[in-house]
Amino acid sequence: MERRESAIDEAHSRAQWVSAREALHHFATYEGPTQSQFHIKPLHWYVACRLVIEGGFHPDDITPRPPFNVRKVKGRYFLDFDPDAGRGGERTILGGLKTKNVDVVVTKDGIGPVLAVSCKGMQGAFRNLTNRMEETIGECTNLHITYPALVFGYMFVIRANRFVANLTSEIADPESSPARQLKMNDIAVREGGAPVESIFRFHTALSELTGRRGMREDVSRYEAVTLALIRPEGDDAGTPLEEFPPAGSPLRFEQFFSSLYLRYEERFVFGAPDLKTVTQRLAWEPDSPALAPSLLQTNATQPALDYEPRLRSEASDDSLVPRVVAATNRDR
């Protein structure tokens, strides 16, 4: 996947249209303070934009608001790219235990939050990963108590710092980049290429927290969870390790968004036909200005898409129902 060199404008905090490669490259190579959360913000933008283009959600319903506008012409929906339409921020949701700021949220008028994604990242101190589980479980439980129908996804990315002989045996140079200031606790990948034990344990724990199907099921589980190790250096910086999570893992990235869409359709469209006029996802015209150039090549303002847009000809009611039913049957 191609990456634009200046894809992310750090002077602006509003949502920008970026690819997964660009958002993950920023995360893996970021050298600023993590307290600002700017190392992970582009991943929020990527998720928000993907929920519009692939998911068919209206940008006005999403926080942070993606940089798109929608035009309805004779019952058809056209998507326009407008950098000035993007907005930053998080949405505050009333939980069963406390209010919570959530990274990416889709909200429907008269219903409330219907889909949300929590994006977390870690660049070092990996032996503390298991301590993140309390936060992970608590966030999900808190929101599902108040909104049991909420489709909630959890995305966790880790900078894949590799063990290099002699690099960790001495105190790192304070003038070197964060990717080089490594101690043993900051190593994510062993010399042979396998993740360290703490990451394997974290993978096992997260695997037990995904796959929530029904609204009356365990409120401490997410509808979908994904985990990825991101290369921090070289020409491959910003790309995930293909071999982890292993094949067959429920945490593989390629199934994350499809799981969220399926659960949303089951609960808010097919499961609530009277709300269909509000909850039905949009399908974009193939000649929408925001989409046509991106289908061909990357340019200075638009990234190459690493997913398929939800186009009208591919998402009609007749063709969508069999795909959802088939996916539901495969899930069982």
Image: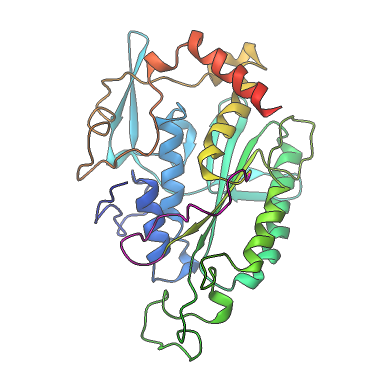
Magenta-colored span: 232-249
Please, which residue is most extreme toward the bottom here? Answer: 170
Residue at the spot 33% in from the left edge and 29% down from the top edge: 69
Residue 87 on image: x %, y %: 39, 44
Q: Is residue 239 above or below residue 255?
A: below
- The location of residue 272, given as percent across then percent down, is 66, 16
Q: Quadrant of residue 85?
A: top left
Dividing the picture into quadrants, the one containing residue 145 is top right
Q: Is residue 123 above or below residue 240?
A: below
Residue sitting nearer the eye, 52 or 309: 309
Q: Is 6 in the magenta? A: no
- Magenta residue check for 246: yes
> Quick one: which residue is furthest to the left in this view?
300
Residue 221 appears at what percent x and percent y?
Answer: 72, 43
Residue 144 visible at all: yes
Residue 202 placement (x, y as % from top left): 67, 60
Q: Quadrant of the C terminus?
A: top right
Q: Spot the residue most to the front.
A: 192
Would residue 136 be found to the left or right of residue 14 on screen? right
What residue sits 65% from the left and 56% below the top?
A: 203
Q: Is residue 292 left or right of residue 249?
A: left
Query: From this viewpoint, is residue 59 visible?
Result: no
Image position of 181 with respect to 69: above or below: below
135 shown above or below 169: above
